[in-house]
Amino acid sequence: MNLDHALERVHQLEAMLGFRDFEIHGFTKSQSVILGLLLRKQTVTKEMLHDALYGDRAEWDVPDPKTIDVLVCHLRRALKPHGIQFKTWYRIGYYMDEANKAKLRAFAQEQRVVTA
């Protein structure tokens, strides 16, 4: 298996897991990845987010796990004007209830979401 084939397979698997196929105009790629996972999973751990965002980087190029806290804070601030929120489960991760998932889907449709 050559490197190009391996990278293509990684991208296919990421799309299957919901890591790379959700974008909303006006949100960063990192924010879109987080939102995509929150829509597809009942619970999203910080480790899942870290792997989804930085799993393809070399070990020396991976940011500190606290970076996730900052991204989550910025994402919550960006969602607030649209009445969309997600919660923290202490020591577990994050989750979004069905009502907020519905709001996010509707907002994404308004913003002409791009999905793979």
Image (cartoon, rainbow, N blue to C red):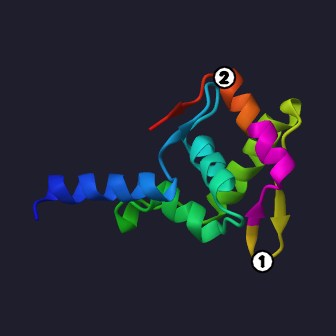
Q: Secondary structure beneath disc 2?
A: loop
Of the 4 image quadrants, the one containing the N terminus is bottom left
**82 to 59, vertically: above or below:** above
At a point 34% along the width and 53% down the height, the residue shown is 12
Check if residue 97 falls in the magenta segment.
Answer: yes
At a point 52% along the width and 53% down the height, the residue shown is 18
Q: Which residue is mark 1?
A: 91
Q: Which residue is mark 2?
A: 111
Q: Secondary structure beneath disc 1?
A: loop
**86 to 29, vertically: above or below:** below
Question: Looking at the image, do the residues carrying marks 1 and 2 touch, with CB atoms under 8 Å apart?
Answer: no
Of the 4 image quadrants, the one containing the C terminus is top left
Q: Is residue 38 left or right of residue 57?
A: right
Residue 82 at least partly seen: yes
At a point 55% along the width and 40% down the height, the residue shown is 22
Q: Taken as a whole, is the magenta stretch helix, strand or loop?
A: helix
Q: Residue 34: x, y in percent?
A: 63, 50
Residues rendered magenta in the picture: 94-104
Q: Is residue 5 left or right of residue 43?
A: left
**3 to 31, vertically: above or below:** below
At a point 83% along the width and 46% down the height, the residue shown is 100
Q: Residue 15: x, y in percent?
A: 43, 51
Q: Is residue 9 left or right of residue 15?
A: left
Judge by depth and name the residue closer to the eye, 54 or 88. Answer: 88
Q: Which of the 4 image quadrants contains residue 9? A: bottom left
Q: Residue 31: x, y in percent?
A: 63, 43
Sequence-wise, the earlier of marks 1 and 2 is 1
Q: Residue 74: x, y in percent?
A: 74, 43
User: What's the amino acid at mark 1?
Assistant: Arg
